Structure formats: structure tokens, C-alpha cells
Image: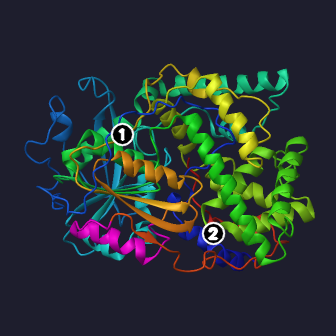
Amino acid sequence: MKKKMTRLLQPLAALSALALTAVVQPVAAQAASAHVGAGRAPAAKSTASPSADASSGKPNEAPAGDVPKGLEKFYKQKLAWAPCKDKPQMQCANVKVPLDYKKPGGKTITVAMAKVPAANGKPIGSLFVNPGGPGESGIDLVSGADKIFSKALRDQYDIVGFDPRGVGSSTAVDCVSDAELGKYLDSEFDLSTPEGKKAEKAQAEKFVKGCKDKSGDLLAHVGTESAARDLDVLRGLVGDKKLNYFGFSYGTSLGGMYANLFPKKAGRLVLDGALDPQLGDARMGYELTIGFEKAFERYAEYCVKGGNCPLGSSVDAAKKKMRALFDQAFKKPFPTADPKRPLNRNILKYGVMLAMYSTAYRPYLDTGLSQLIKNNDGSFLLGWYDLASGRQGGKFKNNSNEARIAINCADYPASSPSVTKKYQEKLKKEAPLFGAGSDGEGTDLCSLLPYHPKSNPGPYTAKGAAPIVVIGTRHDPATPYSWAQALHKSLSNSVLLTWEGDGHLAYSRAGSCIQSPVDKYLLTGEVPKDGLVCPVEQKQGQEAQKQGDLDRKASVKDKLSPESQPPPVIR
């Protein structure tokens, strides 16, 4: 059985972390005010080839005249590549950058990077990549480059990933022990009661105290602007005159920030699954929740059409049943194989949202819901939740959960209670499945931290930059299509490619209609046609097993074997 289930779960192993970007908790508690930029000029579009030179200068040396004043020692440090300890086919290096770019003579931190050398041995330059999050590892992304990027790109580019400041192997944010983090992520409180509010606030204060005690000064300096300045140091050190970059999900915000700060150094940039950094976190959480609500409706259509849907025989019935399961899990969590960890509403919602990231995940949600409904057993969905959050045996694979919170708090100012309340009320009406059931406002973790940004990261205009390629997926729940449209509009020189598919991100899933023009752009500089719309090339879901193929009586251990674990979920 284990061998069979490993085979059945191969679609999970083949999907990188970028396919799971941005699962959100219901109704944003970490809200931020909407500081929308006004008076923007209409975006001027161009299909001319960029003037970016993909070729680099001398290896491991910043091109002449490229060094910002005061940062000379960082751009001129020696970059020493060496085989990575766990993966010798990759090369790793550590770089020093200033903790605070306003005080370059002060404390320094480390940024870790890794590359997969160009297969043909004659790279045209480096292609920097970021998987999103925020909080996910670019080094992990590069280790799976063969599953994500085309052979053509891997032949001609050194694919370079890095762990942004605060993340993974770089100087990392740390808040609490794994045991405490697990308890924090699992917990759910009844915020309609004084006791629930008190317990939730106490837990939030304990978490933030741990962040301040363990991470101190780092917390104020893990925002996207600082990470983009780090990226320019890395670009200079590999000897590239201009940055060539592929960013996914949150990685689109990092790429947009870079182009905004260094428009003349922006080479060929591809931004897939775009964020709209003009939005405050409260509005962003609202739009995300609406996206997941719509995605669930499309899942329900698939489930019903496939027959034997565990939720019922119609879309309306499926939505009502799912809501009833959420309500039941809140009142009395479902038993699991771990008596200490029943399946509560928070965990159940998280697992359902995860399945919206790819049509390949739909059969696994079928299986988990079938076991829940027929056997009153939440074990499979608990295991699914653990795999998604990078958790195994009480340990977490990395610090992505803590880094995500710290980076979001460094980027977005706290919203007013009235703004948060407004979107909560809208969600109760517009998203009865994922927006309802929030019985009170949780503690805003960002408000408890000592550093508060004054404005949101965007909008990004990147005036003077070469054409930037923005990709949006029509039915993306995690980065709604409207965000790609907004980023395209705000950038002074960009083109928008659209895939008509479901799930999160397009490049590695949409087929040749998206991949071919993007590859050509990155390899030659030829800009894709603005407004290109690509249909789904195969019936979505064909990459996964047919509904019902999974043995719904099998154990979680059989199905969720280590060989088939999906990577951590990122927000």
C-alpha cells in the first residue's frame, strides 16, 4: 500500500513550494490600512525588446560604476562559491549585507544563496528566482529547478536562489520553539467570549515577546525594500550588469520593488501570480477570502460532476455541507489518530484552502472529506495540514511561519479597527463559507511589535525600466487575477499574459502558450505580446488521479509518506 500511495501522490512531490503560495487564515487579524496611491499616470506599454544585457561582467565582481555610495565594501566582497553540503550538484555562498541600509557602517547580517550552474557550461548570465511567501526559501526553490524551469532556461542560465533576510539559511527570524509554534498554529479560540479573547491575546503576546527576545533589531529590517537592496548586492557580486529575475507570488512584490528602486538595473523580469502592494492587509485579506470562496465553488462543481462527491449532489449542497463541517469542527473538533490534536475548524479550513492551489490536489481533498464524513476521522486532513505547514514529528522544516509574520509586519502598517471590522462584515455576506464564523477580532500581532511602517510597499511604477512581464491566472485564489491587472497598470512599462486556468501560478502549469513566450523573453529579450490570453491546454485535473482512485480507508501513514510530501505552505 505504501508503494501504491507514493505513486498516487507523485503530483504533490512534483509541485514546488510556489504552487502552494499564500494560504490565509480566515478574516485577516494582522490587518493593515489601505494606503492606495492616487494620481498615477496611465501605464505606457511597449513591445520593444529590452535593452537589458543578459551577459555579465567579470565573475564575482560588481560591474564598474555600479556601486552605491557608502556600500562599496558590500559590493566588492569576495563571493566564494562552494558545493552545497547536502546537494553537491549545487553551489552555495554566503554574503554580508548591512542590517540597516541607512547605517551601512553598522551591524551586518548574512544572506545565503545557491545556484544551479548553466547546463551548457556557458551561461548568458544569472536568473535570480524567488518562490514567494513571504518567508519561503529561494535555495529550496533552486534545488527543484528541474521541476519548475524549462530545459532551455537551465541550459543557458545559472539559476540562482537566495533566502531573503529573515528566512532559512540567511540571518533568520526566530520567535518560539517548535512545540510552541505548533501550539500557536493549531489553536482556535471562541472570541465571542471574554475567556476566549483573554486566552487568544495572551498567546499572541507570548509569541511576539519571543520574536522580540530572540530576533530583536532584525524585525524592523526584514521588509521587502531591504530585501530588494540585498538583491542588488547579489546581482553585483555575480557580475551581472542588470538583474534577470523570475518571481512567483510574493516574489512579484520583491521584483516590483527592485524595479522601482533600480529601474535602470532591471533587465528581464517575469512576475507570475502578482500581488497588488497598494492594498492594505485588511483589503488584501478580504480579496483573498473572496478568491478562495470562488475557488471552492469551482472545486464543488468538479466534485459533483465526478460523481460520488462526499459533500453532496449539487454545488449548493456541497457548500452547505462544508459550512456545517466547519461549524461542527468549531463546536466539537473531529477525532484524529493523535488524541492530543483533534481536527478543529482552523485546521480544517486551512486544509481545504490548500487544496485550492492546484487541481492536482482535488482528489486528496475528496479523500480527506470522505474519511471525515463517513468515518468521523480527521486524521488524513490533519496529516495534510502538517505537510503543508512543513511539520513532521513535532518539528518544522524551516522558519517560514515566523518569517512570514515578521516580513508582513515590516511591510504593512496596522489598519484601524474600523477598517478591519468593515471587511469582516462584508465577508460575512459575500463569503458565507470562508468569511463567516469569525466571532470577534483577533489580536493584531503587528501592533504588538515595536516597529510600524508608515505606508504599504506599493504602488510600483518602475519608470525607466525595460518591459516587465506580468502573468495572471484567471481563477487564482491566492493572488486574484485583478492583482495582476493592477500591477500591470501601475508599472510604467509592462505586458500582461493571462492563463485561463484554476489554481495558483501559471508558468510551470499552463503549457507552451505561456512558457514559450516567457522563455523567449528571458533568453533573447523579445517581449511577449501584451494581452496574450492562453486557454487551458488540457482538462484540468487530468494531471491528478481520477476522483475515487485513492483508497479512502487507507491510513494517513500510507498516503502521506515522506517521499510524497508537499512543500510548506506560504502566505
The crowding category of the residue bearing disc 2, from other C-alpha atoms within 10 Å (few below 14, some 14 to 19, many at least 20), is: many
Q: Is residue 461 above or below residue 513?
A: above
Q: Is residue 126 left or right of residue 432?
A: left
The crowding category of the residue bearing disc 1, from other C-alpha atoms within 10 Å (few below 14, some 14 to 19, many at least 20), is: many
Q: Amino acid at mark 2?
A: Thr
- In this view of the protein, can residue 371 be seen by the observer? yes
Q: Position of residue 507 (x, y in %)?
A: 44, 67
Q: In the image, is residue 251 part of the stretch drawn in magenta?
A: no
Residue at figure coordinates x 53%, y 52% from the top left: 479
Report which quarter residue 1 is drawn in.
bottom right
Residue at figure coordinates x 84%, y 64% from the top left: 311
- In this view of the protein, can residue 137 be seen by the observer? no
Pointer 2 or 1: first along the chain: 1
Q: Position of residue 182 (x, y in %)?
A: 69, 41
Q: Position of residue 306 (x, y in %)?
A: 77, 77
Q: Position of residue 82 (x, y in %)?
A: 29, 56
Q: Is residue 146 left or right of residue 369?
A: left
Callout 1 secondary element = helix
Q: Is residue 381 left or right of residue 407?
A: right
In this view, the residue in front, 459 or 339, is: 459
In this view, the residue in front, 244 or 39, is: 39
Q: How many marks?
A: 2
Please tell me the numbered disc located at residue 227: 1
Q: Which residue is mark 2?
A: 359
Please tell me the numbered disc located at residue 152: none
Report which quarter residue 558 is drawn in.
bottom right
| Cβ–Cβ under 8 Å for marks 2 and 1 | no
Q: Amino acid at mark 1?
A: Ala
Q: Is residue 412 above or below residue 76?
A: above
Identify the magenta region. Answer: 507-529
In this view, the residue in front, 253 or 295, is: 295
